Image (cartoon, rainbow, N blue to C red):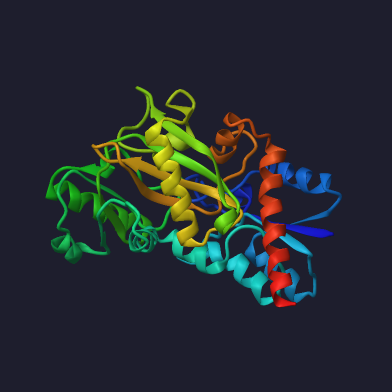
């Protein structure tokens, strides 16, 4: 079986002049090598395709694959994570992880929260601020938390993201709109424990790997799992696998949100608790990082006793199972 890998290599974009922050979500050769080794160990022929433009060139040139392992995040537009799977759907080439609809939806944190809320699941009250005129409609009690509506890896989250006055709210929102050229998401601040829940599988077959609590040390940037905290987590962040009642409730919430959103094969859901210790949905990462050493999903899985090969194996098994089910249904 010929299996392609689609990805965005950080070094490629840095060489083109993009900044460290702009490329924070992209992968290293270490990650691509690790994925390729797992695929090759199954006896498959591995082809490193690269980003969406290279995929498009090769599709037009007539190349095809039996399966694509897709971790491409994309660079431009609100639908950037959906670009590769949309192309693969057009050519009827199967791939790992979620489909274009899910990836377009979940990059927009506000739209995702609307779906989660409609499913009856707990998420903090919120508003979206696209410009200064929208600030008048924000009717939420302070303190509030402000971040970009469509970024990952903690981009736009700093110590100033937690605001307690209308003046600070205005400054934080306009900073996001100006710097990231997108609306700001304003949420009721959740001061409780923070978890990330790793999930493998699809639909009713989805299961949690575990809930990893994120503990902020004295050197960490205050108020959240920020870009700086994620990029330089050593000495700032401590991770621990949690299984107490609150963590178990976070896990149940994460699984319910994963199924409600239609996510597939593997990923993470971030959860934070309110002052009463009730977990609330923050956001989902349906294309979670899988660097073999430092990605949260891999760290979590390792804490739970899963090897890297075992984690990717479960992701691949989920993909192959649902593809087999779909083919049987179409027969």
Residue 118 is left or right of residue 79, and the answer is left
How many numbered marks have been drawn onto this rendered protein structure?
0
Of 256 and 102, nearer the camera is 256
Q: Residue at x 37, y 49 (%)?
A: 281
Residue 180 is left or right of residue 145, and the answer is right
Q: Residue at x 72, y 60 (%)?
A: 68
Q: Where is residue 106 in the image (x, y as percent from the top left)?
A: 45, 60
Q: Which residue is drawn at 41% across and 58% down?
A: 150
Q: Position of residue 180 (x, y in %)?
A: 37, 56
Residue 330 is left or right of residue 135, and the answer is right
Residue 174 is left or right of residue 60, and the answer is left
Of 321 and 291, nearer the camera is 321
Is the C terminus in the top left, top right, bottom left or bottom right quadrant?
A: bottom right
Q: Where is residue 245 in the image (x, y as percent from the top left)?
A: 39, 33
Of 152 and 103, nearer the camera is 103
Of 84 and 89, nearer the camera is 89
Can you see residue 58? yes
Can you see residue 228? no
Quarter of the rendering containing residue 292: top right
Q: Where is residue 176 in the image (x, y as percent from the top left)?
A: 31, 54
Quarter of the rendering containing residue 224: top left
Is the N terminus in the top left, top right, bottom left or bottom right quadrant?
A: bottom right
Quarter of the rendering containing residue 328: bottom right
């Amino acid at each position: 079986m010929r299996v392609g890998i689609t990805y965005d290599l950080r070094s490629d974009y840095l060489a083109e002049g993009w900044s460290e922050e702009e490329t924070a979500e992209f992968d290293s050769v270490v990650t691509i090598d690790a994925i390729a080794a797992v695929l090759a160990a199954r006896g498959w022929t591995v082809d490193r395709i690269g980003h969406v433009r290279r995929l498009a060139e090769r599709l037009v040139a007539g190349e095809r694959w039996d399966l694509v392992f897709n971790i491409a995040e994309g660079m431009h537009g609100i639908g950037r994570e959906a670009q590769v799977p949309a192309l693969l759907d057009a050519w009827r080439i199967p791939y790992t992880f979620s489909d274009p609809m899910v990836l377009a939806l979940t990059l927009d944190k506000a739209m995702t929260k609307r779906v989660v809320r409609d499913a009856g699941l707990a998420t903090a009250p919120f508003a979206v601020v696209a410009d200064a005129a929208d600030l008048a409609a924000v009717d939420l009690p302070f303190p509030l938390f402000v971040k970009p509506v469509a970024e990952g890896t903690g981009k736009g989250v700093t110590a100033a993201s937690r605001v307690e006055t209308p003046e600070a709210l205005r400054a934080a929102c306009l900073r996001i709109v100006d710097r990231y050229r997108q609306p700001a998401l304003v949420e009721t601040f959740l001061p409780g424990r923070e978890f990330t829940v790793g999930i493998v599988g699809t639909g009713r077959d989805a299961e949690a790997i575990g809930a990893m609590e994120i503990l902020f040390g004295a050197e960490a940037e205050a108020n959240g799992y920020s870009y700086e905290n994620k990029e330089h987590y050593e000495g700032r962040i401590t991770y621990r696998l949690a299984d107490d009642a609150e963590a178990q409730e976070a896990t149940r919430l994460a699984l319910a949100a994963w199924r409600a959103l239609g996510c597939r094969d593997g990923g993470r859901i971030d959860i934070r608790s309110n002052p009463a210790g009730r977990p609330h949905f923050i956001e989902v990462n349906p294309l979670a990082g899988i660097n073999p050493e430092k990605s949260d999903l891999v760290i979590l899985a390792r804490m739970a006793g899963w090897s890297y090969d075992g984690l990717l194996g479960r992701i691949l098994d989920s993909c192959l199972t649902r593809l087999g089910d779909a083919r049987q249904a179409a027969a």
